[in-house]
Each structure stands twice: as C-alpha cells, then as structure tokens.
Amino acid sequence: MTPTFPDVTLATERLVLRRYEEADQPALTAMMDDELTAAWTSVPAPYSAVDAREWIARFAPAERDEGRGIVFAVADHLTQRLVGSVHLMKTNWRVRSAEIGYVVAPWARGEGYAVESVLAVARWLFGEQGFERMELRTAAGNTASQQVALKIGCLSEGVLRSAGMVRTRTEDGRWAEVRTDVIVWGLLPEDLEDLDDLGPVGEAVA
C-alpha cells in the first residue's frame, strides 16, 4: 500500500495552511495568472478558471491520495483570503525526503508569507512526519525564491547546468521558453535549530 501524508491543516501566527476548496477558484486563478508566476513556474500561461478548477478538484487531491506529496492552500488567518500555495512533491518514502515548491499571490508579496508558510511545512515534515530532508530548487535568475531558501535555513548544494526551463516575453509580447541553470537547496532537521528564535511557526490543528 502506498504511504500518504495525513489530510492535515497547519496554522501559524498569521496563516492557515489547508486543502483547496471550490470557493478558492477565483483567487487561485488570479494568483496563477500573473507575470512572475508564469515566468518562474510551469503553470499554464495564461491561467484560466478551468485550470484552477482542475487543480482544486483533481490534481491537488491526487498528489496526496497517490502518495506523491501534499498541496496546501495558504490563507490569511483573519480574512481567509488566499495568499499563496505550498506543494510538497516528489516524495521518497524510503529516503524520507521531499521537494517543496511555493507561489505567493501578487497582492501578498513582500509580507514574509513564503518564509512563514514554508517553515511551517518544514517543521511539520521533520517533527511530525519523521522526514530527514527537504529539497528546494530555484532557477538561477529567481533571486526572490533564493532569498526564501536562505531565510528558512537551506544550504546551497550545487548547480544543475541547463536543467530547467523558464519563460520570458518576446518583443511581440508572447511567452517563450528558455533554458536555465537550477540551484539545488537542501534542508535537514538540524538546519532548523538556528531558527529557534523565530518561535513556533507551524502547528497541526486538524
């Protein structure tokens, strides 16, 4: 039987990390149909309401059900407005490792939500799920994502040359894909010890 993550909700001081709901579709569409999100991720561009409905109804639940990972909608604790998404993926249950990816909504950038939500997932992954490694991969030009990796305590482990694809706008306004180097970041349970002064940012509540 394939192991799976529990269907859990996590909470931080400002955020709730939970499963996606049908009501999230408009906000998810707006979050993903964004220039920076399209440039640095592999989501459809443009991103439509149909794409959002498919993600919420099929793809996100399948990640957990089929043992590949788990997807969290990240919402503001007070307003419940969607501010981001965190995705644990490529889970290796034997090695006890997983890769993490994240997106922050355009209206929520610069508030520290990526660091807060990724730290919450990391502490849950290591503390309650008994994992030994979390990996993050960033395009060489994505300095904002690299700053998140550094702030959560990741160590840069090397560069995979020409290992990824990003998008850039052409002169006529269309998207074009170009190859990029990819930086591999690793986080182990002991790497979080230096972040204890940040306090308990992640707690399972359901």
Image: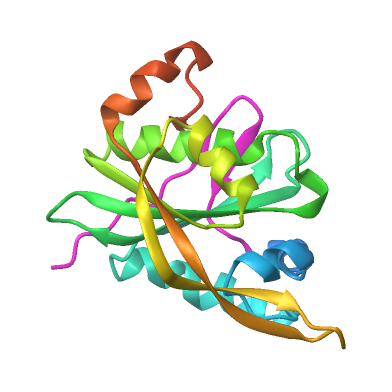
Specify the quadrant of the image occupied by residue 51: bottom right
Instruction: Reply yes or no: does residue 205 show up in magenta.
Output: no
Residue placed at 42% from the left, 46% from the top?
Answer: 8
Residue placed at 52% from the left, 16% from the top?
Answer: 198
- Percent position (x, y) of residue 75? 67, 45
- Percent position (x, y) of residue 161? 40, 66
Q: How many marks?
A: 0
Question: Vertically, is 44 above or below 31?
Answer: below
Seen in the image, is 119 located left or right of residue 129?
Answer: right
The residue stretch that appears in magenta? 1-21
Residue placed at 48% from the left, 43% from the top?
Answer: 9
156 or 7, nearer to the observer: 156
Give the quadrant of the C terminus: top left
Residue closest to the far right = 172
Specify the quadrant of the image occupied by residue 178: bottom right
Seen in the image, is 133 located left or right of residue 31?
Answer: left
Using the rendered image of the protein, determine whether residue 100 is visible from the camera's viewpoint. yes
Using the rendered image of the protein, determine whether residue 22 is visible from the camera's viewpoint. no
Question: Vertically, is 22 above or below 82?
Answer: below
Instruction: Reply yes or no: does residue 2 show up in magenta.
Output: yes
Give the quadrant of the N terminus: bottom left
- Percent position (x, y) of residue 98? 31, 53
Q: Name the chief secondary structure element in magenta.
A: loop
170 or 204, nearer to the observer: 170
